[in-house]
Image: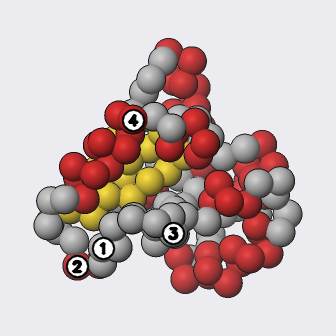
């Protein structure tokens, strides 16, 4: 299994292999910069669709802002990955990682999902599987 610090070394190579690498980079303007290791509560906010869909969802943006305004909370985002990225992750046994610090899903204390519609439920299961979170 790939360690967190190895993600940074591999990220450039991975991004060169996907169709829309901007989905996985993060670092947008006005994104809170919190120290993951110093946070009392680490919250993974997941959206079971692609980045473009999730970031256009007002509810997702509001929840993200509220959580990161709490001094003791570091909230980071996860989105469903496109099939090209999913194939790379699965073939190389790499876990899905957050946009902000490239942390693995299982490193968070709380995993929350923002569900806009029922068709996203299968993507919830896929995100959990890509994050090595047992379904039972």
Mark 2 residue element: helix
The residue under label 3 is: 27
- Tell which tag, 2 or 3, sits nearer the viewer: 3
Q: In the image, which disc is placed on residue 34?
A: 1
Q: Residue 30's quadrant in the figure?
A: bottom left
Please indicate, yes or no, whether residue 91 appears anywhere in the rendered image.
Answer: no
Please indicate, yes or no, whether residue 78 appears anywhere in the rendered image.
Answer: yes
- Asked whether the residues under the numbered discs 2 and 4 touch, taking CB atoms below 8 Å apart as contact, a structural biologist would say no
Residue displayed at 50% across by 43% down: 55
Of labels 2 and 3, earlier in sequence is 3
Whether residue 67 is situated above or below residue 14 in the rendered picture: above
The residue under label 2 is: 38
User: Few, some or many C-alpha atoms within 10 Å of disc 2 (few <14, some 14-19, many ≥20)?
Assistant: few
> Which residue of the protein is positioned furthest toward the front in this rendering?
29
- Estimate the spatial distance between the alpha carbons at disc 1 and disc 4, rounded to whole Å: 22 Å
The residue under label 4 is: 58
- Estimate the spatial distance between the alpha carbons at disc 2 and disc 4, rounded to whole Å: 28 Å
């Amino acid at each position: 299994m790939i360690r967190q610090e190895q993600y940074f070394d591999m990220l450039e190579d991975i991004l060169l292999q996907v169709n829309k690498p901007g989905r996985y980079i993060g670092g947008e303007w006005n994104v809170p910069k919190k120290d993951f290791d110093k946070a009392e509560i680490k919250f993974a906010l997941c959206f079971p669709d692609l980045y473009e869909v999730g970031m256009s969802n007002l509810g997702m943006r509001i929840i993200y802002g509220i959580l990161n305004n709490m001094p003791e909370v570091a909230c980071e985002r996860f989105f469903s990955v496109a099939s090209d990225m999913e194939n790379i992750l699965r073939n190389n046994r790499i876990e899905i990682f957050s946009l902000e610090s490239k942390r693995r899903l299982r490193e968070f204390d709380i995993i929350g999902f923002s569900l806009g519609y029922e068709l996203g439920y299968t993507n919830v299961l896929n995100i959990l599987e890509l994050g090595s979170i047992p379904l039972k």
